[in-house]
Amino acid sequence: MNDLWQMQSFLVSSMKADTTLALSTCAVWLDPMLFSADGFDGDSEDDDLTYALQVCRGCFPEVYGEAVQALWRGDGWSALNRAICTGLNRHLVTPLRSLEQIRYGVPFEALGVDRDDPDFSTQYPQLVPIAAWFEAEGSDPQETAAALIQSLSAHGDTGIHADLAHLLGWLFGISGNTLVDWTEDMIWEGGIEPPDWTPDEIAFINEVQEEAHEMVSSAQRALECLEQNQCWAQMLQRNLKLVRERKKPDEQPALRWQPDTCHSPSDSTHPDPELLPVRGDPAPSDRGWGDHRVPG
């Protein structure tokens, strides 16, 4: 037996003989991240995996347990990547596609539209004619849309009135939900940091994302109604004209809306000001999510 094997045998015997060291070894085997430093610091697959295990340990213990068992089996990077992402996605509204994403914070999907984008007409052809109705010299489309939304909100949180309010909020970025009002480019250019991997931040962004999907789905129902029901399209344009003709910006003209004839099954999806990041108001998560004025 050469010296190297003798040294290994000596170390193994010493570890078994020292109760404290044996317990420490067992603890690290059962919980590999027990003594690891928090945070992400690196740029390799191993660093992504280490950080993913830290996230799982701190936020999703059952996913951490599954990942540790995969490590015991000797699974490679591809299998670990797939297993951990699958486990994490059970708790996320917007799925994590790869562990390489984890360093950028909790994933989210921005659903906003940018009317100034050269590709706007190509990406959202259904919105083009509606946006054109609001373009008039001397009027602010957002202020006009806000007045219409205020009038529509008096008709409740469900049905075509709510759907139409969500359509205007989505088109003009005034819904009150960051992920409805902003595109991904706007979020990054605005310097808004992605949510951290903490239980509170994950719950927060999940709720914002769920409501964003509900509101955009509601807006899509309104689009269908306007395309299929000319009475509603004409009524929107008529009320739009009344808002433009008001003498004072804060004056609320007497607008008239017909009863719900589109039979929309919309849910109650108006934003909760205590929960969602509203323009200019402090959100619970803050760190940039509280002040969402578009730069420029």
Image (cartoon, rainbow, N blue to C red):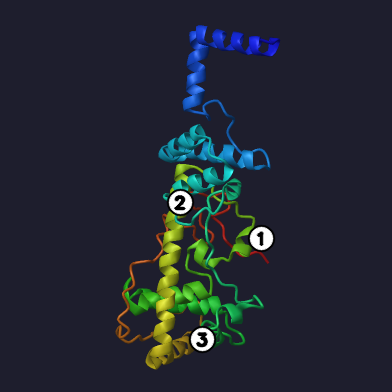
> Can you see residue 154?
yes
> Can you see residue 253?
no
Q: Residues within 10 Å of mark 2 (few under 14, many from 20)?
A: some
- Side of 90 where 80 appears, left or right: right
Residue 272 in percent (x, y) is at 40, 60
Q: Residues within 10 Å of mark 3 (few under 14, many from 20)?
A: many
Q: Earlier in the sequence, mark 1 or mark 2?
A: 2
Mark number displayed over residue 89: 2
Residue 49 in percent (x, y) is at 58, 40
Which amino acid lies under the numbered mark 2 shown in the image of this protein? Asn
Residue 94 in percent (x, y) is at 48, 57
Give the residue number, with chain letter if any, for mark 3. 244
SS under mark 3: helix
Give the residue number, with chain letter if any, for mark 1. 189
Name the residue: 64% across, 58% down: 188
Q: Nearer the viewer's eye, disc 2 or disc 3?
A: 2
Cα–Cα gap, marks 1 and 3: 32 Å
Cα–Cα gap, marks 1 and 2: 27 Å
- Side of 171 where 214 appears, left or right: left
Q: Nearer the viewer, residue 42 or 184?
A: 42
- Which quadrant is the N terminus positioned in? top right
The reply to whether the C-beta atoms of the residues labelled 2 and 3 are less than 8 Å apart is no
Residue 51 in percent (x, y) is at 57, 39
Which amino acid lies under the numbered mark 3 shown in the image of this protein? Arg
SS under mark 2: helix
Mark number displayed over residue 153: none
Q: Nearer the viewer's eye, disc 1 or disc 3?
A: 1
